[in-house]
Image: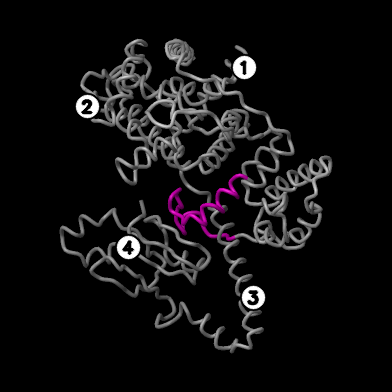
Amino acid sequence: MEDYWIELENIKKSSENRQEDQEVVVVKEPDEGELEEQWLKEAGLSNLFGESAGDPQESMVFLSTLTRTQAAAVQKRVETVSQTLRKKNKQYQIPDVRDIFAQQRESKETSFRLPKDKTGTTRIGDLAPQDMKKVCHLALIELTALYDVLGIELKQQKAVKIKTKDSGLFCIPLTVLLEQDQRKVPGTRIPLIFQKLISRIEEGGLETEGLLRIPGAAIRIKNLCQELEAKFYEGTFNWESVKQHDAASLLKLFIRELPQPLLSVEYLKAFQAVQNLPTKKQQLQALNLLVILLPDANRDTLKALLEFLQKVIDNKEKNKMTVMNVAMVMAPNLFMCHALGLKSSEQREFVMAAGTANTMHLLIKYQKLLWTIPKFIVNQVRKQNTENHKKDKRAMKKLLKKMAYDREKYEKQDKSTNDADVPQGVIRVQAPHLSKVSMAIQLTEELKASDVLARFLSQESGIAQTLKKGEVFLYEIGGNIGERCLDDDTYMKDLYQLNPNAEWVIKSKPL
């Protein structure tokens, strides 16, 4: 634990040198009803309460796809909000919790039971925004259900409006910083200063002993901050003057001085609570769900940080920085929310030191796993989409009947939309940006997404083939999914059986 306490002491010294520039934020603690109402909103169930409350049938499709533990987590929050609203005598429509869940209890739980690896791994960023929104709703419910089952309190910290600078590099909200950076470099997803600090450390060689552990001189770091604020965007800052340990100190300072923590105000306590989960499997499950729930800017920046930390660890034989050493040094920078002025006793700090260092260890070691979307959640999204399509189809038929339209013509057209000119056991893959724009492909037990891509790329000229390899991907579009970028190891026949109404398109990933 020595590295942890040394890092904490370095942080305190650094804070003393920059104290005059910082503003402590007092976080307002909302009451339980407000917390649970906010939770329901973030879980996609806001239409059950408040002025916008309407027919709860709108949420029935969503609720019908939940597992029993997920449903129990929702039910608990619905009951709390109902009681709170009644106490406050709010004139809102307050549905009876039994009405909301009655229909769900009547229907049997169904789930897809395909081999785990056959339909491919879904990574964060592979799904269309509308499906990713559903994933986030389900992830919040699943995380809460997990904590409920284990008897661990999970209360989100309510985000508050705080006074922050609207330009600069340090003490700037991530979203503001990225908007600023995107005017310089369109499409940037990770702050430019963050990228530059990492590249500067890497330029010095990752074999330097004590990298990340040995701090730069506090006065020099303060002066470098001021100089960077003045010259970074002008391109006149002299990076050659920045020593490697100074760059590492600046990187940690950048993370600490974010007005709201990199792990987010809403979920910082949930990240801290991971240490209280009894098994490693449950800890990884919780971290996976929390990573999904992070805002895009926070998640992308955290990913860049963890990838860099892994590079440092890969050189542990020379730099003496093992995964546990790096975790000990980085944990206080990510998990101690200094900007929010949260006080803690020495005893609590000691418990948190061991726990958060272990959580940091898991974040680094299992980062590839943590940036995937659990298969059962993707299947729940598919089920929601299927139910919504059925609901829309019923509504359309009803509308057509009212209009005295030829329903048979509509049904026939709808049925044949995806079957035209394609024999059974064959899929037609479109590739509008390649030389071969379309190809009928016979499905076999062993055919993978990578095989389909290879067939199309083999039609390209030598240079074009090299350029496009790794830039274009096979997508599953429509049917029971909005859009999904396929993993190379996806077995196409198994996926086709799961989503027979999908279209298959080769294209590049959007920025």
Query: Label 1 near label 4: C-beta < 8 Å?
Result: no
Q: Are marks 2 and 1 in contact (CB under 8 Å)?
A: no
Magenta segment range?
Answer: 112-140
Residue 177 sits above or below residue 74 on the image: above
Q: Is residue 377 left or right of residue 502?
A: right
**Which residue occupies the foreground of this view, 239 or 310?**
239
Residue located at (40% from left, 62% from top)? 475
Q: Name which of mark 1 and mark 3 comes first in the sequence.
A: 1
Kind of residue at disc 3: Arg
Residue 236: give its label.
2
Between marks 4 and 2 in the image, the one whose residue lies nearer the viewer: 2
- Circle 1: element type: helix
Please report the residue visible at 64 percent of the width from the left and 74 percent of the height from the top.
Answer: 395
Q: Amino acid at mark 4?
A: Asp
Q: Can you tell which of label 3 and label 4 is closer to the viewer?
A: 3
Of 419 and 494, nearer the camera is 419
Amino acid on which disc 2 is placed: Thr
**Disc nearest the viewer among 2 and 1:** 2
Q: Is residue 339 visible?
A: yes
- Mark 4 or 1 closer to N-term? 1
Residue that carries the numbered disc 3 in the rendered image: 394
Q: Secondary structure at mark 3?
A: helix
Indicate yes or no whether the magenta region holds residue 114: yes
- Residues tagged 1 and 3 counted as in contact (Cβ below 8 A): no
Is residue 239 at all visible to an observer of this figure? no
Q: Position of residue 312 (x, y in %)?
A: 33, 27
Disc sitting over residue 451 in the figure:
4
**Where residue 410 sits: x, y (%)?**
55, 84
The amino acid type found where label 1 is placed reads: Arg
**In the rendering, at what x and y percent does residue 303 appear?**
41, 37
Please name the residue that numbered disc 1 is placed on: 348
